């Protein structure tokens, strides 16, 4: 699972807003078996950013999500994706934050039964710059 | 052979008071046991409503109207992005089943989070109370841990067609009261 990205931040009102572009290369498996067994109806995949700020000990923001139905290819090869949702911080904790971690996780939706949340192995750290972008080039 | 309606009247006349009371007690026991099981589930899961029916299509294609969800609400379970929570907006009775997309947790354990239905374009801020931007732990009824498709449709039909509900109750009541132990 590998992701590369570039980013810059811009203030909106009084909260930091981060912009992230990313690539996702992933192969979703269940241990060594195919993830789509007889009782898996679909997967809900989501890319979340997790980080700490002065304001909040833990922050998690979902940047992107996708429904993967049974029958779809479990291998993902996405490039230059923009985040689906605005990456607002609760405060100004993105500026200069070197420790924002992106992980890919998924919710297994069975035909009937338990609904587990699984986090993929592999994650990437996104360091945010110390200054705000003033030109809108996103 | 006599018709079934005649049989029914025959049964009723033959039943004396003692048998009637016995049947009523039987019925009451069944109802009490069901209630006890429900209360037991509330205690074991920590949720005030451990089984809920999905009422809208806002979580499709994962859940559809009529699906049944099983919830837990353990106090020590942290709320994390990606989890499916059932919550109630302050002042409203209807539980909503959506996914957590943002979490901000302070060092002292204070959590505020934002939800969104998978099938909705926008987050749930429009559903919250006027001026409310975040949900808190107290708004949570439970976390969805398991699900059964279609089974909850019975509840929805009973809600939308009250005559069906009464007919069902009448049939169940008649069966229990008239069933005779051999």
Image (spheres, rainbow, N blue to C red):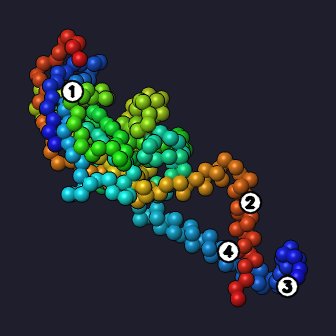
Are labels 1 and 2 assigned to the same chain? no
At x 72%, y 69%, the residue is B173
- Dot 4: within a 10 Å radius of its alpha carbon, few (fewer than 14), some, or many (20 or more) residues? some
Distance, label 4 to label 1, CA atoms, is: 65 Å
At x 72%, y 73%, the residue is B175
Are labels 3 and 4 assigned to the same chain? yes
Q: Position of residue B35 (x, y in %)?
A: 56, 67
Are labels 4 and 2 assigned to the same chain? yes
In the image, taking residue B50 as reference, residue A88 lies left or right, namely: left
Between residue B157 and residue A17, name the one nearer to us: B157
- Dot 2: within a 10 Å radius of its alpha carbon, few (fewer than 14), some, or many (20 or more) residues? few
Label 2 element class: helix
Q: Position of residue A101 (x, y in %)?
A: 16, 38
Mark in front: 4 vs 1: 1
Position of A56 relative to B40 (above/below): above
Position of A27 relative to B124 (above/below): below
Residues at badges 4 and 1 in contact (C-beta under 8 Å)?
no
Q: In this figure, which residue is indicated by the disc labeled 2?
A: B167
Label 4 element class: helix
Label 2 chain ID: B
At x 21%, y 14%, the residue is A137
Between residue A27 and residue A59, name the one nearer to us: A27
Distance, label 1 to label 2, CA atoms, is: 59 Å
Which quadrant would the N terminus of chain B be assigned to in this image?
bottom right
Residue B27 has which mark? Answer: 4
Q: In this figure, which residue is indicated by the disc labeled 1?
A: A80
Label 1 chain ID: A
Residues at badges 3 and 4 in contact (C-beta under 8 Å)?
no
Which quadrant would the C terminus of chain B be assigned to in this image?
bottom right
């Amino acid at each position: 699972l590998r992701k590369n990205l570039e980013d810059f931040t811009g203030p909106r009102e009084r909260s930091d807003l981060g912009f992230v572009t990313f690539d996702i290369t992933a192969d979703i498996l269940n241990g060594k078996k195919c993830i789509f067994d007889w009782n898996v109806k679909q997967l809900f995949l989501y890319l979340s950013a997790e980080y700490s700020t002065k304001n909040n000990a833990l922050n998690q923001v979902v940047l992107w999500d996708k429904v993967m139905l049974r029958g779809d290819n479990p291998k993902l090869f996405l490039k230059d994706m923009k985040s689906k949702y605005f990456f607002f911080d609760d405060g100004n904790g993105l500026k200069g934050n070197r420790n924002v971690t992106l992980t890919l996780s998924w919710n297994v939706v069975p035909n009937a039964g338990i609904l587990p949340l699984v986090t993929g192995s592999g994650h990437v750290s996104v360091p945010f710059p110390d200054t705000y972008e003033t030109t809108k080039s996103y | 052979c006599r018709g079934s309606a005649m049989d029914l009247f025959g049964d009723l006349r033959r039943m004396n008071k003692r048998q009637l009371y016995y049947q009523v007690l039987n019925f009451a026991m069944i109802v009490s046991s069901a209630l006890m099981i429900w209360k037991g589930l509330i205690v074991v899961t920590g949720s005030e409503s451990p089984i809920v029916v999905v009422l809208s299509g806002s979580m499709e294609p994962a859940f559809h109207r009529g699906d049944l969800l099983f919830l837990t609400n353990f106090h020590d379970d942290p709320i994390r992005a990606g989890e499916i929570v059932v919550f109630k907006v302050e002042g409203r009775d209807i539980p909503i089943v959506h996914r957590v997309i943002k979490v901000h947790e302070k060092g002292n354990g204070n959590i505020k989070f934002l939800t969104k239905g998978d099938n909705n374009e926008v987050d749930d801020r429009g559903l919250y109370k006027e001026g409310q931007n975040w949900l808190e732990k107290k708004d949570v009824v439970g976390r969805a841990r398991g699900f059964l498709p279609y089974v909850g449709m019975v509840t929805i039909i009973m809600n939308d067609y009250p005559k069906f509900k009464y007919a069902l109750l009448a049939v169940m009541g008649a069966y229990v009261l008239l069933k005779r132990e051999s």
